[in-house]
Image: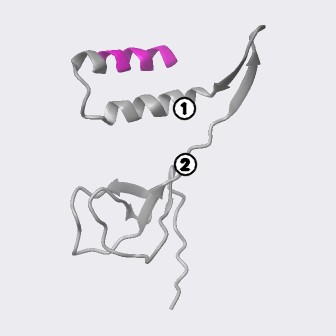
Amino acid sequence: MKIELDLPEIEGFEPDEGKQPRYPKEGEWFLTDMDSGRAEMAEHDFCSMTCIILKRKEPVYKTTTVDAGRELFKCVEIKAVEDALEFIERLSLMNVNDVAKVKALKELIK
């Protein structure tokens, strides 16, 4: 039997392929609230509640080619830099100096 679900728009996510709903596994994203469209990452395997499993959408960034005289440069919108900094912040390998540098870069973007 196939069931069609009318899901809310969840920014940055889309439903994962495969059997839905199912129990989330550690590290998977799942829909926590159908009304708000809030996504959450499972910190451990669930075996008590079935959920809609989500996957991150690949971001689409606007690019521009800039002629700098001798060379052509491909530039990407600031959102790509912001996303990259957010990803770096989530890495647990950062020391205090790295955190300060990332914060300074974020301030420059604003």
Report the predominant secondary structure element of the magenta stretch: helix
The answer to whether mark 1 and mark 2 are in CB contact below 8 A is no
Residue 29 lies in the magenta-colored region:
no
Q: Position of residue 73 (x, y in %)?
A: 69, 19
Rendered view: 64 above or below 11? above
Magenta residues (range): 100-109
Residue placed most toward the observer, 91 or 11: 91
Q: Amino acid at mark 1?
A: Ala
Q: Residue at x 30, y 16 (%)?
A: 100
Separation of disc 1 and disc 2 at Cα? Answer: 11 Å
Q: Position of residue 4 (x, y in %)?
A: 55, 80
Q: Residue at x 57, y 26 (%)?
A: 78
Residue 110 visible in the shown view? no
Residue 73 visible in the shown view? yes
Residue placed most toward the observer, 71 or 101: 71
Left or right, 34 with respect to 63, comes to left
**Rendered image: mark on residue 105:** none
* Residue furthest top as drawn: 69
Q: Could you tell me how many numbered marks the image carries?
A: 2
Left or right, 74 with respect to 7, comes to right
Rendered view: 56 above or below 47? above
Q: Position of residue 99 (x, y in %)?
A: 29, 21
Residue hosting label 1: 80
Q: Residue at x 62, y 28 (%)?
A: 77
Q: Amino acid at mark 2?
A: Glu
Residue hosting label 2: 58
Q: Indicate the secondary structure of the residue bearing disc 2.
A: loop
* Residue furthest front as drawn: 70
Q: Position of residue 47 (x, y in %)?
A: 22, 74
Q: Residue at x 34, y 59 (%)?
A: 28
